[in-house]
């Protein structure tokens, strides 16, 4: 059985009381923030495009997300910035590709890198994060859930613009023996509240955990407080129940047709419904822009028990095929976004940065290249599509592929090494496209593999290099890639160095809880990123 | 350029006039058939589960079908009876598995067989077809489009209960040199009107053809006439634009994000919208049960230009994996079926036979085994699910797999022969599940491959035979299969013999058109079914 930590239980109870009091109050006196709408970004963890009913999950178990799409705008050509969690999250909050904001490695070619406990780096102080900018217009910002932009003190959310945080700096891996590797801490603002598998239980065998309920309560509580204070807010709701270890709370366990993974999705779907419903009850729905998406494709290596679905797309997390980077995406803003619309606009998580600034009436920083577009013309007028700008698919320090319009050109293909693959690490189970899903790093720069994603969203039928169609689109790709590479100033890579001494041995607040652990001597090394 | 044949053009114009006259009349005096609702079954050709927006096709280009689902009931666990056209169509109209109604071959083990021009057999006179039974309650029945239950005179639709027919007995393959092989005829009732690639053009290069428009007009015209006559009717609308050669009429060419195949889907979607809209305009929508589905999975061998999508499912047409037999399925009956419902009921095309009889208040024949269930309890009360009866996946004369609840057991696996596969015939492009997508006919009867279709709809992760889960479900499968085999009386196989003399040389009516061709001498042989 999972036990809720005392502090969290107390918080949840307090939230419910506040909720009862405020609901009556808010109904009678509706808040309005005029031209500065509240912003909520709901970012899922490893949830795939194909996990939503509205996107074709066969058992259709996401009624709240499907309703959100029916009331808002569904984007079917929406991308993350990287097929892995940390870089994609850094891109969302900075509006910049990981290769610019430093969330990549140069230790080896085209390697996926993220922020495990031994990582030395994190989000650079030179990067400007969305909440820092929103503060200029008086927004209060909270992150609920997974941060993943570095866990050392200088990298934590409250050092980078967030006013509040409830959640964790790393993945909920474990449980660990604290003498070798500390269990991951859960923070309340700038101090730890406890650790996963200690105060915050995840039953690895049954999959039971009440964490999504805690994250939901934290989200509801924050919204309530800001609504009461007539305070414009930014809520970054980054629940992680669909990342292995996948978990769900008791009422959801066994409820899905899809097993534990589906149970987790159902609980997240329920939570999304509760959050939207509160906005409506408070009468601030018409003044709150909400966007739902995920950080990367479903982790097929963990499927079917601990991983989701990328629908018709090839491969998943860790890869630059569509399954790795095309994401479920729904925008919701009653009274502003026309209900039941589908946008084919090619868009990505970095657009959420630029769009949020536009919504808040804040100028984007002029001293750096931003990769996001302002989507408000699309959001507010579904008939309009923006310029056909490219999507860049990076893996670590390499531009693997580019999409322009319906065409996608692969300059490099690689799943993972033969050694890894033969040892059972398979990011494309059951899928094998000759010459495409390669286990050698294969360069195609002189003759890129080109797919038409409209006809062939699954990237199974490369265009013949002899076809007129191929020859016709190639020029556009070359121009775009040359321009991109010319303008590119890579950031200082943050994901190169590892050190056991930097792990979460003694997070702030550990003294009060008697939970400080002794770090080993510092002994940094160049991190080994296997794929 | 495609030219409409004169006869067809004349018909379309006449239909429009009738339409204008009747619309006004019908609006003022609404028809009602009390307890015998009209029945429309819309059966697509090679359209895949994943081709509908509501089922996750990324460019979401089926607004009318998506609206049909929003106004009706979407079945996500709906099956055809066979991964190939003729047998699945025979099953729909007889309510019986192909192995019972004779639509299979014993020439070789587990071979797919259908009704090409050289086939000698067809639907047996011992089979009772749906329109024959509906006639007892005064229904008038029409088939529009592809028949595919045999093209020799005794096998044609008007010999088996249909009152009207506009369409073709075979696939629209061609064009042929009439001296070697006749072009396929198009019939109006019992006489040919012309031939494909002659009077009825399909431009193989551009994909242009107005056939879907003809089929639409035929459907509209029939509905109008029956509504006017206050006549209960059965319309079997079997358009075939999504079967290679895929085609669309000029207004739809180039309109899809998906190329020609998507254009064809868009035109079919438009046509469905027009048919439903007419029911509404005539005020008979609340008295007309409509069901939309497809005859088998998308033909991946023809993709992406001439084939569709099976969404997250494995393989396609010709195979007994989910991609071959799970179909898009929508029931629509305003005022009776609760709008916007999703049913997880495991169901199939043979249920449409039994359900139609139930709707018409006709007893099912008691002298034979029927494989369909009456779905009306599910349709009329979305909360109720029927008994967990098995789905039988046959290929020719072999029971390849069985589904019970969420579990599917494969007793045999086979895609096609190594020789065929190496020559480029690939029914699972880009997909390869070791030990599952086999190119040897592989028996697993002693230890079936078992998948949990809820967790793993793509059949990529067989259950471990050592798991408790596997052992627990195995008993149920064994019992079901034993029972099924015990009760099975195979029909006389109709798809064994071929003869060039039986081809469409001189269909009825050819004299009037001067289009009779001279058949060669009869020289029957055992048909060779390669896969």
Image (cartoon, coloured by chain):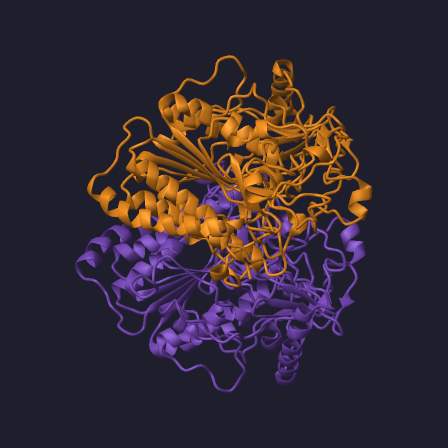
Chain colours: A orange, B purple
User: A427 or A528, which is in the foreground?
Assistant: A528
Image position of B487 with respect to B114: above or below: below
- Residue B515 visible somewhere in the drawing: no
- Residue B392 visible somewhere in the drawing: yes
Q: Position of residue A31 (x, y in %)?
A: 25, 35
Q: Is residue B263 left or right of residue A181?
A: left
Q: Position of residue B389 (x, y in %)?
A: 54, 75
Q: Residue furthest bottom?
A: B367
User: B35 or A10, which is in the foreground?
Assistant: A10
Q: Position of residue A134 (x, y in %)?
A: 41, 25
Quarter of the rendering occupied by the N terminus of chain A: bottom right
Q: Is residue A372 left or right of residue B518?
A: left
User: B254 or A328, which is in the foreground?
Assistant: A328
Image position of A466 with respect to A491: above or below: below
Which residue is located at x 42 percent, y 32 percent? A141
Please tell me how many numbered marks the rendered image carries.
0
Q: Position of residue A21 (x, y in %)?
A: 27, 47
Quarter of the rendering occupied by the C terminus of chain A: top right
The image quadrant that residue A523 belongs to is: top right
User: A256 or A238, which is in the foreground?
Assistant: A238
The image quadrant that residue B135 belongs to is: bottom left
Which residue is located at x 75 percent, y 48 percent? B424
Q: Is residue A256 left or right of residue B399?
A: left
The image quadrant that residue B515 belongs to is: bottom right
């Amino acid at each position: 059985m999972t036990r809720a930590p005392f502090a969290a239980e107390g918080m949840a109870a307090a939230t419910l009381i506040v909720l009862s009091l405020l609901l009556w109050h808010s109904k009678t006196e509706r808040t309005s923030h005029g031209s500065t709408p509240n912003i909520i970004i709901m970012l899922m963890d490893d949830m795939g495009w194909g996990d939503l009913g509205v996107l074709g999950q066969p058992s259709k178990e996401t009624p709240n997300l499907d309703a959100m799409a029916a009331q808002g705008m569904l984007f079917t050509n929406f991308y993350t910035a990287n097929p892995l969690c940390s870089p994609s999250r850094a891109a969302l909050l900075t509006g910049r590709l990981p290769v610019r904001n430093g969330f990549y490695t140069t230790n080896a070619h085209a390697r996926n890198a993220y922020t495990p406990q031994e990582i030395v780096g994190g989000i650079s102080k030179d990067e400007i994060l969305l909440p820092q900018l929103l503060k200029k217009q008086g927004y209060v910002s909270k992150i609920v859930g997974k941060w993943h932009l570095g866990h050392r003190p200088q990298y934590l959310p409250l050092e980078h613009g967030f006013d509040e945080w409830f959640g964790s700096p790393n993945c909920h891996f474990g449980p660990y023996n604290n003498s070798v590797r500390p269990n991951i801490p859960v923070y309340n603002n700038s101090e730890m509240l406890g650790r996963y598998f200690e105060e915050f239980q995840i039953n690895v065998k049954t999959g039971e955990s009440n964490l999504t309920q805690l994250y939901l309560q934290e989200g509801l509580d924050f919204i309530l407080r800001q609504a009461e204070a007539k305070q414009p807010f930014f809520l970054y709701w980054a629940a992680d129940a669909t990342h292995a270890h996948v978990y769900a709370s008791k009422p959801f366990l066994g409820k899905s047709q899809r097993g534990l993974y589906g149970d987790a999705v159902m609980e997240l779907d329920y939570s999304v419904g509760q959050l939207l419903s509160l906005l409506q009850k408070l009468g601030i729905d018409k003044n709150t822009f909400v966007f739902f998406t995920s950080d990367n494709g479903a982790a097929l290596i963990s499927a079917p028990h601990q991983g989701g679905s990328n629908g018709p797309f090839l491969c998943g997390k860790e890869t630059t095929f569509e399954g790795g980077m095309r994401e479920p995406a729904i925008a919701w803003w009653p009274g502003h976004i026309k209900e039941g619309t589908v946008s084919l606009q090619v868009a990505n998580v970095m657009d959420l940065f630029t769009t949020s600034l536009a919504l808040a009436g804040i100028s984007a920083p002029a001293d750096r290249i931003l990769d996001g577009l302002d989507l408000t013309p699309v959001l507010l007028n579904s008939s309009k599509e923006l310029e056909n700008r490219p999507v860049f698919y990076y893996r670590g320090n390499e531009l693997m592929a580019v999409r322009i319009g319906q065409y996608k050109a692969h300059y490099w293909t690689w799943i993972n090494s033969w050694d890894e693959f033969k040892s059972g690490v398979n990011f494309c189970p059951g899928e094998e496209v000759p010459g495409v899903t390669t286990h050698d790093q294969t360069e195609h720069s002189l003759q890129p593999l080109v797919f038409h994603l409209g006809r062939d969203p699954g990237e199974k039928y490369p265009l013949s290099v002899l076809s007129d169609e191929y020859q016709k689109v190639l020029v556009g790709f070359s121009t775009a890639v040359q321009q991109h590479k010319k303008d590119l100033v890579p950031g200082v890579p943050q994901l190169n160095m590892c050190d056991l001494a930097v792990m979460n041995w003694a997070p702030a607040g550990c003294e009060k809880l008697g939970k400080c652990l002794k770090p080993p001597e510092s002994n940094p090394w160049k991190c080994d990123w296997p794929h």
